[in-house]
Amino acid sequence: MSKIILTGDRPTGKLHLGHYVGSLKNRVKLQNEEGNKTFIMIADQQALTDNARNPQKVSSNLLEVALDYLAVGIDPMKSTIFVQSQIPELAELTVYYLNLVTISRLKRNPTVKSEINEKAFGQSIPTGFFVYPVSQAADITAFKATHVPVGEDQSPMIEQTREIVHDFNRIYEKDVLVSPEGILPEKGQGRLVGIDGKGKMSKSLNNGIYLADTEEEVKRKVMSMYTDPGHIHVSDPGKVEGNVVFTYLDVFGEDKEQIQSLKEQYQRGGLGDVKIKRYLNEVLEDFLKPIREKRAQYAADKGEVLNMLKAGSLEAEKVAAQTLDEVKDAMGINYFK
Ligand code: TRP
């Protein structure tokens, strides 16, 4: 069945292997499926909801995220890549949807709740941040998306969107909006653990390997990776579970037999950390080198990348404007039509 897909990222940093495993890989697959229409949005407006005093953090990462997309094979001929802030219709839809959502409902959103704690806003929660799930509903419904591939933490946003769609269509007695489904990562295929083994790979934990990292940076990070602290001498038996090197080999390694035999040897004792790290470094280089090269090619022509984003934004705006028009029709506020 053909799908309309919409997803996106806040441009607050470059994308890393965790993003690749958790979402980018799947997006490339979806974009290549016959009949699908894919929209990929750089959510700069959402990123500004908690960076209003530091807009440069957002604007300077816009191009970085676009380069990461292109480098992993998101293809502007197949996917519409666009910039949220350049589509004013999204903000306009948000205004109408806000009237359908209560403050107490917003307060119950578990992802927003935990973000508020993490970010330590205290009593100073920006209103725009608090209501961003409603703006996200506008992003999704503007394109009549049927499917939204996202991480587990975004499920509450999809749920909220479905409620808005349901309420809107009922109240205005017209099936204008489409109820989306989330596409969540399969069990165990979610976000990759960081190189420190402590938590998911993330910028704030400073435990990431980035798509744009140089060969030297990748090597240094692999060599510092968390393994098994009990594996002190080469001859000691080592643990494979929770050992980040083996986790990454399972995800990125192609030679499954070789990996299995390395695991067995490691568990028996007699295989050193440096050796498996060198092997992982080769595996990661095989994967990252073409991505890094493609990224550098695009980075050499930033004007071209901006043109691509501009064309994508113009195309996206046409779709969003059509939906907004239908929304206003349904609400009976298209006075001058
Ligand atoms: N909230 C998403 C994130 O933090 C980004 C996002 C904004 C998004 N609008 C969206 C994702 C619409 C999917 C659909 O990564």
Image: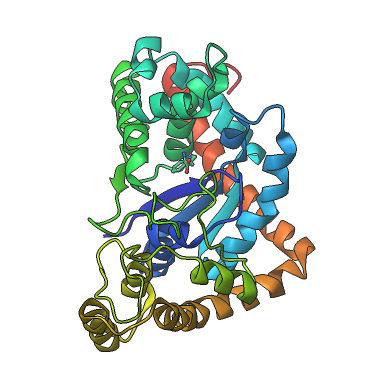
Q: As drawn, is 198 to the left or to the right of 220?
A: left
**Could you say where residue 260 lies in the image, as x and y percent from the top left?**
23, 82
Compared to 318, does 259 lie above or below?
below
The image quadrant that residue 76 belongs to is bottom right
Could you tell me which residue is drawn at 70 percent across and 41 percent down? 57
Could you tell me which residue is drawn at 40 percent across and 76 percent down? 273
Q: Is residue 278 visible?
A: yes
Could you tell me which residue is drawn at 29 percent across and 50 percent down? 184
Compared to 33, does 57 lie above or below?
above
Compared to 290, does 32 lie above or below?
above
The image quadrant that residue 280 belongs to is bottom left
Residue closest to the eye, 265 or 176:
265
Residue closest to the eye, 201 or 99:
201
Q: Quadrant of the N terminus?
A: bottom left
Residue closest to the eye, 22 or 84:
22
**Could you say where residue 308 lies in the image, as x and y percent from the top left?**
67, 60
**Could you say where residue 82 lies in the image, as x and y percent from the top left?**
60, 50
Q: Quadrant of the C terminus?
A: top right
